[in-house]
């Protein structure tokens, strides 16, 4: 029996007990007054009304998700393309017991090679993943990423934007398969798939397609012995339900998507005659403890943050961008044409506040839809493009685009020489791609053209942190953000449990408290 302890009644005393998450909390009535304590009431000295067991952040979500990935907490930071989620960010979260994915998408081979080497140095054997993004227009990029992951012995990839399975993804999975002492198949290469549709999720919930595996064996790219094990395990170890998020997004509501994927996961497991082998995560809109607690209440095994990490000290983007993100509101995100799938009309969610990029990008897509070539553009539109958007003659912009294509995508350049409309699309994609680069580099001369991937979680995070130490960009360290989100979620989960027992708490205890802002003379950026 837990020993009796003092009963606390004042709001500050009650909060101290409630927020001690590694200890149980007892709600006790003594002499007509209700208070809280770490121990039960003494016999004859009070009435026990409710009990909440210890609930440290480690107990949120699925208990076996963190150890499977070498982590301590059910928390993952999703990849942010272009190296925004770089080695500093990934290492900081890994050291804090979280899992984080390197933002490999868009990085040239030499930069990705260097980043993975740096991670190996910073957190040898640590918990981290490398993003593997589906690139149907340039499949060699997938092969390069997988080759580098194998070279640096990366044991986990975050697979994103896949609408179909590819040989490279399957190759990575199969090359990690083996058997343990008990004879069961073990996956030395783990896959965490980020999806927003049930049909895509099902691809990862089932074993790798036999046809793809057989082709890899025939090509000599995977050994037959490992290929023979592929049918025994799902393609993914975890599937992240990506709701309304920054960047590429279908803007699905998490409360709809997550339960749907949970039902699908359980159905597939029943069909295969296995237990729930695949963990299910929640991403999109995760920017406050309330959102984290809601995700776990919906059944998530782990949560994934995105936009909020871009504003942290360790994120590899410019300081002006972090300052701009710190002013974002919930309604300050808009959709804009995507650089990688411009012709298909695919959009990404970006910050609309403080930049003209969404309006400029929308104009480019309208021009592409209405005209067959650059030569067909009306004179007024041509001048507007050169003066306000591209800020250079069309010929100069195309020259830079063509030089890049000649080195990296010669087939696209050859097609552009035959197809004037494709040439126009490639030129417009140059502006879209440069928008994110200008933002990361903090090019103030092109501040109006910054493309900043961002979801509504950023605005929610700013509202939650207002008036606290985390309101200051220089104090937003990734590990601290993760810690407060999880502790806040555990605190709110404790309150929800106690409220079901009829407990009414004072307003001062109704929410998790962030540390106050630094006092005078306390430099920004200090912990």
Image (cartoon, rainbow, N blue to C red):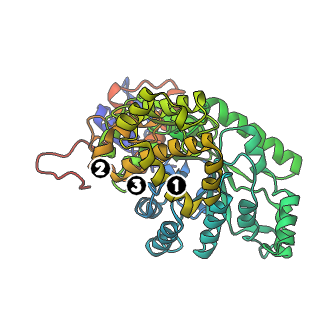
Name the residue tied to disc 3.
479
Name the residue tied to disc 2.
319
Residue that protrudes farthest toward the left in the picture: 521
Task: Tell me which label, 1 or 3, sits earlier in the chain.
Answer: 1
Spatial CA distance of label 2 from label 1 is 31 Å
Identify the residue at horizontal 78%, vertical 43% (top origin).
266
The answer to whether any part of residue 436 appears in the image is no
Name the residue tied to disc 1.
402
Residue 271 percent across, percent down from the top left: 88, 46
Residue 192 percent across, percent down from the top left: 65, 54
Quarter of the view holding residue 176: bottom right
* Residue 434 higher or lower than 115, as above or below: above
Pick whichever, 81 or 337, lies toward us.
337
**Secondary structure type for disc 1:** helix
Identify the residue at horizontal 65%, vertical 48% (top origin).
418
Residue 127 percent across, percent down from the top left: 54, 64
Left or right placement of residue 268 versus residue 411 in this view: right
**Secondary structure type for disc 2:** helix
Task: Tell me which label, 3 or 2, sits earlier in the chain.
Answer: 2
Pick whichever, 344 or 347, lies toward us.
344
Left or right placement of residue 77 versus residue 316 in this view: right
* Residue 507 higher or lower than 119, as above or below: above
**Secondary structure type for disc 3:** helix
Mark 1 surroundings within 10 Å by alpha-carbon count, few (fewer than 14), some (14 through 19), many (20 or more): many
Identify the residue at horizontal 40%, vertical 55% (top origin).
479
């Amino acid at each position: 029996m837990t020993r009796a302890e003092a009963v606390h009644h004042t709001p500050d005393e009650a909060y101290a007990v409630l927020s001690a998450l590694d200890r149980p909390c007892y709600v006790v009535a003594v002499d007509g007054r209700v208070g809280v304590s770490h121990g039960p009431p003494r016999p004859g000295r009070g009435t026990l009304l409710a009990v909440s067991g210890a609930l440290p952040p480690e107990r949120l979500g699925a208990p076996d998700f963190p150890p499977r990935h070498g982590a301590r907490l059910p928390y993952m930071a999703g990849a942010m393309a272009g190296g925004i989620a770089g080695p500093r960010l990934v290492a900081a979260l890994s050291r804090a017991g979280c899992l984080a994915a390197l933002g490999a998408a868009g990085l040239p081979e030499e930069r990705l090679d260097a980043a993975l080497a740096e991670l190996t140095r910073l957190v040898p054997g640590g918990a981290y993943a490398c993003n593997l993004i589906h690139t149907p227009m340039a499949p060699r990029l997938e092969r390069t990423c997988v080759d580098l992951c194998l070279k640096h012995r990366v044991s986990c990839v975050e697979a994103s934007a896949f609408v179909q399975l590819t040989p490279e993804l399957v190759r990575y999975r199969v090359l990690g398969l083996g058997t343990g002492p008990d004879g069961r198949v073990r996956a030395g290469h783990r896959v965490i798939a980020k999806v927003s549709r049930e049909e895509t999720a099902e691809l990862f919930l089932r074993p790798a397609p036999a046809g793809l595996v057989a082709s890899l064996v025939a090509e000599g790219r995977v050994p037959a012995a490992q290929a023979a094990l592929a049918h025994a395990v799902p393609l993914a170890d975890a599937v992240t339900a990506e709701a309304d998020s920054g960047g590429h997004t279908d803007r699905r509501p998490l409360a709809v998507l997550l339960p749907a994927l949970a039902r699908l996961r359980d159905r597939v497991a029943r069909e295969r005659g296995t237990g729930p082998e695949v963990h299910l995560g929640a991403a999109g809109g995760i920017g406050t403890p309330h959102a984290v607690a809601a995700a776990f209440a919906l059944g998530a095994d782990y949560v994934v943050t995105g936009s909020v990490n871009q504003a942290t000290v360790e994120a590899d983007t410019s300081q002006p961008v972090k300052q701009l993100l710190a002013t974002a509101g919930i309604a300050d995100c808009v959709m804009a044409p995507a650089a990688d799938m411009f012709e298909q009309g695919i959009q990404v969610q970006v910050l609309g506040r403080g930049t003209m990029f969404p309006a400029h990008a929308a104009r480019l897509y309208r021009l592409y839809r209405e005209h067959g070539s650059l030569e067909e553009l009306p004179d007024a539109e041509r001048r507007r493009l050169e003066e306000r958007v591209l800020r250079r003659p069309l010929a100069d912009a195309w020259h830079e685009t063509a030089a890049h294509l000649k080195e990296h995508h010669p087939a696209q350049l050859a097609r552009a020489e035959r197809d004037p409309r494709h040439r126009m699309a490639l030129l417009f994609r140059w502006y879209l791609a440069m928008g994110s680069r200008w933002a990361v580099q903090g090019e103030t001369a092109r501040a109006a053209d910054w493309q900043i991937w961002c979801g509504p979680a950023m605005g929610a995070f700013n509202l939650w942190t207002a008036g606290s130490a985390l309101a200051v960009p220089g104090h937003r360290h990734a590990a601290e953000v993760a810690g407060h989100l999880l502790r806040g979620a555990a605190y709110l989960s404790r309150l929800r449990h106690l409220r079901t027992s009829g407990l009414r708490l004072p307003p001062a205890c109704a929410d998790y408290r962030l540390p106050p802002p630094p006092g005078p003379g306390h430099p920004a950026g200090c912990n």
